[in-house]
Image: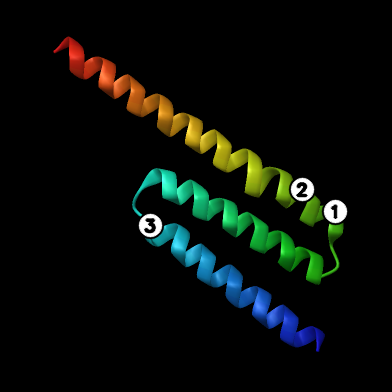
Amino acid sequence: MADAVIVVALLLVALSATAAVAVRDPVRQALVLSVLGVVLAVLFTVLQAPDVALSQLAVGSALTPLLLLLAVHKVKRRGRKEGRHR
């Protein structure tokens, strides 16, 4: 039973990682990256590494996508300002 859960978790990781690479829009990439972080946290929990899972939840599914969204927002805003001055 435990092997089946691990296989399902690994398949979910592979699918979400592929989706993160395939998506072209940076905002959607950040959201898919957040989903990937949650799926990885589930995989680490299944593999009995709760400390790594908690770290992955905090960094991989919350902090990193948030920083990416803020960076994309700032770049888009800066691009609009430079477009007005030309």
Which quadrant does the N terminus fall into?
Answer: bottom right
Q: Distance between the residues labelled 3 and 2?
A: 25 Å
* Residue underneath mark 1: 51
Q: Which residue lies furthest to the left in this view?
A: 86
Question: Residue flagged by tag 3: what amino acid is it?
Answer: Val
Q: Which of 83 and 6 is in front in this view?
A: 83
Q: Residues within 10 Å of mark 3 (few under 14, many from 20)?
A: few
* Residue underneath mark 2: 55
Q: Which of 3 and 30 is in front in this view?
A: 30
14 up-or-down from 28: above or below: below
Question: Residue flagged by tag 1: what amino acid is it?
Answer: Asp
Front position among marks 1 and 3: 3
- Check whether the beta carbons of the residues at disc 1 and disc 3 lie within 8 A of each other: no
At numbered mark 2, what does the secondary structure look like: helix, strand or loop?
Answer: helix
Q: Residues within 10 Å of mark 1 (few under 14, many from 20)?
A: few
Front position among marks 3 and 2: 3
Relative to 58, is 25 on the left or the right? left
Name the spot of residue 54 as percent of width and height, x first. 80, 51
Q: Which of marks 1 and 3 is nearer the N terminus?
A: 3
The residue lying at 46 percent from left, 66 percent from top is 18
Quadrant in which residue 84 is drawn = top left
Which quadrant does the C terminus fall into?
Answer: top left
Q: How far apart are marks 1 and 3 (CA)?
A: 30 Å
* Residue underneath mark 3: 23
